[in-house]
Amino acid sequence: MLTADLLAQIAARAGLEPASLVLKRLDRPDGPDLWLDPDRYLYPASMLKTPLAVASYTLVADGKLTLDRTFEVLQANMTANDKESPLIPGYTSPLYELLDLMLTRSDNVATNMLYDILGRERATQIVQERFGLRATAFYRKLSGSLPLIHDPGWDGMHRNSHSAGDAARLFELIARGLVPYAFELRQTLARQEWNNKLPAGLLPGDRFAHKTGDTGEVTHDGGILDTDQGASYVLVVYTGLESDDENNAKFAPFMSSLRQFL
């Protein structure tokens, strides 16, 4: 039987420490429902992009935005990406493309544009008040490399926040269809192009709609797992480890060991 202590041991054996972990079964009420230090502050990196997408879709559902509305890419939002992006200054992108790029490729320029389109204060209010994500806030635009992007809208003090606990709550809301455009969000997360962490330890037939986060101080992965046997879970793994090949490779043996209990 999987317990919180055993989950912590599996993570420790894989070298995923320090960590903030959540595992919750969705299709049965008898669990497991395991939360290990879920409110610990670890910089969310690109995990923040999922709640930003939810805030965007909420404004679409409210009639404040449309998915086909276009926005020009400005030089002020340019920063490095790990994959080639069509977002270059002067290019005009519809909102649906920005959302897709932000989630599937983790595009930082798309994210920075959405900070401007939504407004970071309004986006924060939406996810906190309408979806209960009290440990989530949008403060600073994202930088794909140093030097950090110039961001005159930043207050100079606060860092972006989106805890592992909030990430798990949000993935559950998406899985249960309790956010606007939940089906579209889940389908987009299922097309994730960064699959070298938790998916590398899954079994054939398993499906993981997920998002990753990476910086020089953290490496994360989390999402909605549907096993080949028909079970459904939310699994979120945040770590205070630098994102590099060695640390990212630790997610696969963790997932492989955990998968035996799911």
Image (cartoon, rainbow, N blue to C red):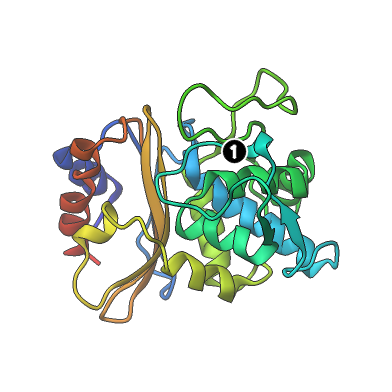
Say which quarter of the image contains residue 26.
bottom left
Q: Residue at x 45, y 55 (%)?
A: 105
Q: Residue at x 58, y 45 (%)?
A: 109
Residue 140 position, x and y percent, is 64, 31
Q: Is residue 226 left or right of residue 105?
A: left
Q: Is residue 174 left or right of residue 153?
A: left
Q: Is residue 89 left or right of residue 20?
A: right
Q: Residue furthest right?
A: 63
Question: Vertical placement of 8 versus 1: above or below?
Answer: above
Say which quarter of the image contains residue 96.
bottom right
| Residue behind mark 1 | 78
Res. 130 in view: yes
Q: Residue at x 60, y 52 (%)?
A: 51
Residue 182 position, x and y percent, is 60, 71
* Total marks placed: 1
Going by the numbered disc 1, the residue's amino acid type is Met
**Nearest the camera: 136 or 59?**
59
Say which quarter of the image contains residue 191.
bottom left
Q: Residue furthest front?
A: 90
Question: Vertical placement of 48 versus 105: above or below?
Answer: above
Res. 21 in view: no
- The quarter of the image holding the C terminus is bottom left
| Label 1 Cα neighbours within 10 Å, binned few <14 / some 14-19 / many ≥20 | many
- The quarter of the image holding the N terminus is bottom left
Question: Vertical placement of 135 versus 101: above or below?
Answer: above
**Nearest the camera: 195 or 207?**
195
Mark 1 element type: loop
Residue 185 position, x and y percent, is 56, 68
Q: Residue at x 69, y 69 (%)?
A: 180
